[in-house]
Image (cartoon, helix red, strand yellow):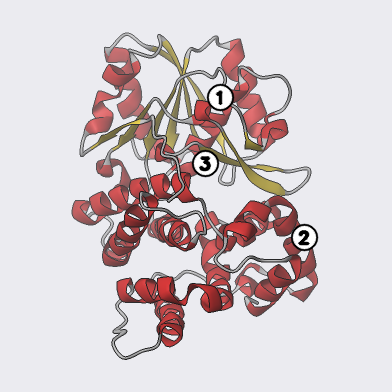
Amino acid sequence: MDFSFFMPAQLIFGRGKAKETGTYVKSLGNKALIVTGKSSAKRAGHLDLVTKSLEKEGIDWVLFDEIEPNPLTTTIDRGISFARENKVDVVIGLGGGSAMDSAKSIAFGVKREGSIANYFGPQPASEALPIVLITTTAGTGSEANSFAVMTNPETHVKRALSSPSTYAKISIIDPELMLTVPQKVTASTGIDVFFHSMESYLSKKSHPVSKPLSLEGMRLVVENLQGAYEDGNNIEYRERMAWANTIAGIAINLAGNCGIHGLGHPISAYYDIPHGETLAAVSLAFLRFSISEASEKLTEVAKILGVQTGGLSSVKAAEKAVEALETFLKNINLPTKISAFGITENDIEKLARNAYENSIHNFKASPREMTLEDAISIYRESL
């Protein structure tokens, strides 16, 4: 019973809420920088929806639409320069986790010297431009936490900065914006929600506020992700996945992630693989590694995944949880082996050292604390 709970973002949840963006932004600034990806927000009509709402309220805006999946520190540095040149006073992140994390980093970096790559890890509370986040995927939960994940292309380090300054002032979660998400992206982002929920539950840092959110997040994903994957136009599935995403984002803000994220990040950093796919590919071996210390919690995971645990020992139930998760991943066509990315035995030590050096906090928070040798073993088992 040792924890803190700080959640300053105002969450605006509901169908059609994105149409009201301007009414929320006008209290924060007069000139907005919209940070988004290269095409999806335009193609889906989300950018037009937001800019019309801003213009209706008399808010000027400029667009920085260079954000790539697995955003790079070099791209974010360009966004920071663009924000300064245009003298914006509020930053809007429109898109999935990459756009939202980049918006946070730009709002933070405008008030700092040097490259954003200098600010990985926890940062103290200090000045930043106000942030508004509009999520278009049920994926990272970035709208509900302070994390901004990015990759340094020179060092292949993928890490987050976090600060009380990188919370959104306002986050808009509109399930209608998610109806256009492609099937593959629905699966990859949706499974990230599951792992946020599960890892925050397994984490040594989990506590009475985070646990109910973690459990509910897992339940919602198991009950709704396959439906959203198979019938993307179903607003009910999309709405429940959107809520799962938000509460899982709060859960990791409270309790953090474990080794699955620590092992997944280097794969994205080196090979530019979608984040959720990397997590899926290392998850099964990680869970088998963790059974000795997490069998009781994994029994609860098994129940959520539909396993009948009556009469089973906690160890056997935990093993069944891994089997059930493998089936769940395959049902939405997610990889369960890192060899699917072209990774071989020759790559394992490089990945493991990167993970150990840059995600030691995830290793330590895991139910069974991980060493460098453990990371090597888990990657090897994941081939």
Residue drawn at x 79%, y 62% is 350
Residue 190: image quadrant is bottom left
Is residue 309 shown to the viewer in this render? yes
Q: Amino acid at mark 2?
A: Arg
Is residue 234 toward the left or the right of residue 221 in the image?
left
How busy is the neighbourhood of tag 2: few (under 14 within 10 Å), some, or many (20 plus)? some
Is residue 238 toward the left or the right of residue 207 in the image?
left
Question: Which numbered marker is on residue 125?
Answer: 1
Extreme residue in the front direction: 1
Above or below — where is 164 with respect to 231? above
Residue with the mark numbered 3: 98
Is residue 38 shown to the viewer in this render? no
Q: Nearer the viewer, mark 2 or mark 3?
A: 2
User: What is the CA distance from the residue labelled 1 to the residue labelled 3?
Assistant: 22 Å
Q: Marks 1 and 2: in contact by CB < 8 Å?
A: no
**Residue 145 on image: x %, y %:** 45, 39
Which of disc 1 and disc 2 is earlier in sequence?
1
Q: Amino acid at mark 3?
A: Ser
> What is the quadrant of the C terminus in the image?
bottom right
Residue drawn at x 37%, y 56% is 211
Q: Amino acid at mark 1?
A: Ala
Which of disc 3 and disc 2 is earlier in sequence?
3
**Residue 76 on image: x %, y %:** 62, 31
Camera-side residue: 289 or 325? 289
User: What is the CA distance from the residue labelled 2 to the residue labelled 3?
Assistant: 25 Å
Above or below — where is 89 with respect to 293? above
Residue 367: image quadrant is bottom right
Above or below — where is 166 with respect to 200? above
Q: Nearer the viewer, mark 2 or mark 1?
A: 1
Residue drawn at x 24%, y 32% is 17
Residue with the mark numbered 2: 353
Residue 151: image quadrant is top right
